[in-house]
């Protein structure tokens, strides 16, 4: 038997409760329904205050360093941010500023975002995908965007969104299997 996949879900939301956190938890749950996984959820609401004052990785407290290592060692990253001033949140970007430049090479990343309306959906293509392209990560072709109308408070109520989450999970697993089976030295070349 192989070890379960390590899924790390990162919420870039600055609020709790959060629609973004609800979305990435739903995506992680959909993955867990289809494969044996361990899931760790990293919320900026928890680590943001410790992250905000650091300028270098060696200035991070041990608790935040553990989260960075978890991101780097994940078999699948699920990352999500609310749309904030036409992009992801600043602390979300600051968190990924500490991730090793080559630590995510070839790593599958499922992109997700939330926003007030459908016009914000392009955050996935114009903000998140380029960020993870820098890391040479394998951004999965199908991202998951949710607008305010997909929720009742912080519960997903949209059947269309539930279907999209299920489809993203189905399409992610073959790529996670492929990436997890490749030797690490081939990825960093």
Image: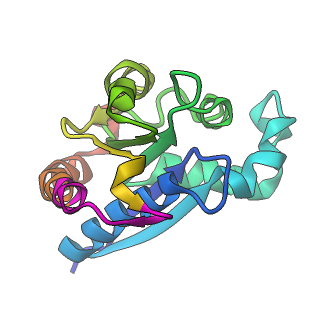
In the rendered image, the vertical position of residue 120 relative to residue 114, given as above or below? above
Residue displayed at 54% across by 30% down: 88
In the rendered image, the vertical position of residue 24 relative to residue 72, given as above or below? below
Q: In this view of the protein, which residue sits in the foreground, 1 or 185?
A: 1
Asked if residue 56 lies left or right of residue 167, the reply is right
Q: In this view of the protein, which residue sits in the foreground, 57 or 133?
A: 133
Residue 25's quadrant in the figure? Answer: bottom left
* Image position, residue 7 (x, y; %): 39, 61
Q: Is residue 116 at least partly visible in the picture? A: yes
In the rendered image, the vertical position of residue 2 relative to residue 64, given as above or below? below
Q: Does residue 160 show up magenta in the picture?
A: yes
Residue displayed at 26% across by 66% down: 31
* Image position, residue 142 (x, y; %): 20, 40
| Colouring scheme, one of rainbow, by chain, secondary structure, one colour | rainbow
Asked if residue 126 lies left or right of residue 58, the reply is left
Residue displayed at 33% across by 41% down: 107
Residue displayed at 67% across by 47% down: 14
Residue 128's quadrant in the figure? Answer: top left
């Amino acid at each position: 038997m192989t070890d379960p996949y390590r899924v790390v879900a990162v919420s870039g939301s600055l609020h709790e409760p959060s629609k973004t956190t609800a979305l990435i938890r739903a995506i992680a749950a959909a993955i867990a329904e289809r494969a044996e996984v361990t899931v760790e959820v990293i919320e900026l609401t928890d680590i943001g205050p410790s992250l905000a004052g650091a300028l270098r990785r060696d200035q991070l407290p041990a608790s935040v360093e553990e989260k960075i290592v978890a991101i780097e060692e994940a078999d699948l990253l699920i990352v999500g941010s609310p749309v904030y001033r036409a992009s992801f949140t600043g602390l979300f970007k600051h968190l990924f500023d500490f991730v090793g430049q080559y630590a995510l090479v070839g790593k599958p990343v499922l992109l997700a975002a939330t926003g007030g309306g459908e016009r914000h959906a392009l955050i996935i293509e114009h903000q998140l995908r380029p960020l993870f392209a820098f890391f040479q990560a394998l951004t999965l072709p199908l991202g998951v965007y949710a607008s305010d109308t997909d929720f009742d408070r912080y519960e997903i109520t949209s059947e269309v969104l539930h279907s999209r989450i299920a489809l993203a999970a189905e399409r992610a697993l073959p790529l996670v299997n492929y990436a997890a089976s490749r030797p690490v030295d081939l990825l960093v070349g």
